[in-house]
Amino acid sequence: MELNVSTASQGGHAVVTATGELDLYTAPRLQAALAGLLRDQADRITVDLSGVEFCDSTGMNVLLSAMKRLKEQGGALELAAPRPAVKRILQVTGLDTVFTVVDAVPALDTL
């Protein structure tokens, strides 16, 4: 299955929407989108995971790496609306205590 990635931003906040499967083969798409936002100096990135049906360790590593780089720049990364399968991976690995996980994607126009 493919992974589709789109971004929208307003001010220093960006929302990255991913749909499909996040794995070894598709993770580079998400990594490229996040790297672009980091270069553009986004200070807050929300990754909308509501459309991600599967995520392996490669996908988690992409998210961790982006969060680390963003923190180094003084920003923050949060994960929004993960499906039960992805939420379970976060819980089993303990990453639910590392990432900020929110139930819904914040609307850019309300920020």
Image: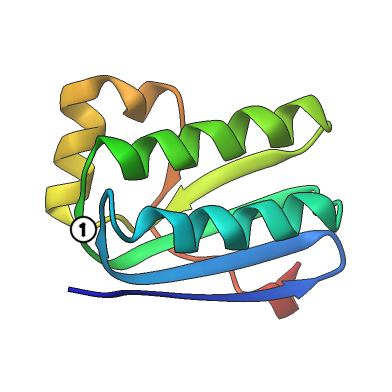
Give the amino acid at mark 1: Arg
Q: Which element type, helix, strand or loop, lies under badge 1?
A: loop
Relative vertical location of residue 100 with respect to residue 39 in this rendering, above or below = above
**Residue 40 left/right relative to 27:** right
Q: Across the whole image, how many numbered discs are drawn on residues?
A: 1
**Residue 38 left/right relative to 63:** right
Q: Residue at x 26, y 34 (%)?
A: 90
Residue 97: x percent and y percent?
Answer: 39, 22
Residue 104: x percent and y percent?
Answer: 42, 63
> Which residue is nearer to you in this view: 65 or 90?
65
Q: Residue at x 32, y 39 (%)?
A: 58
Residue labelled with disc 1? 83
Q: Quadrant of the C terminus?
A: bottom right
Residue 101: x percent and y percent?
Answer: 42, 42
Residue 62: x percent and y percent?
Answer: 46, 41
Protein image colouring:
rainbow
Q: Residue at x 29, y 55 (%)?
A: 82
Relative vertical location of residue 5 with respect to residue 103 in this rendering, above or below = below
Q: Residue 28's image quarter?
A: bottom left
In the picture as drawn, the residue positioned furthest to the front comes out as: 25
Q: Residue 46's image quarter?
A: bottom right
Relative vertical location of residue 95 with respect to residue 7 in this rendering, above or below = above
Q: Residues within 10 Å of mark 1 (few under 14, many from 20)?
A: some
Q: Quadrant of the N terminus?
A: bottom left
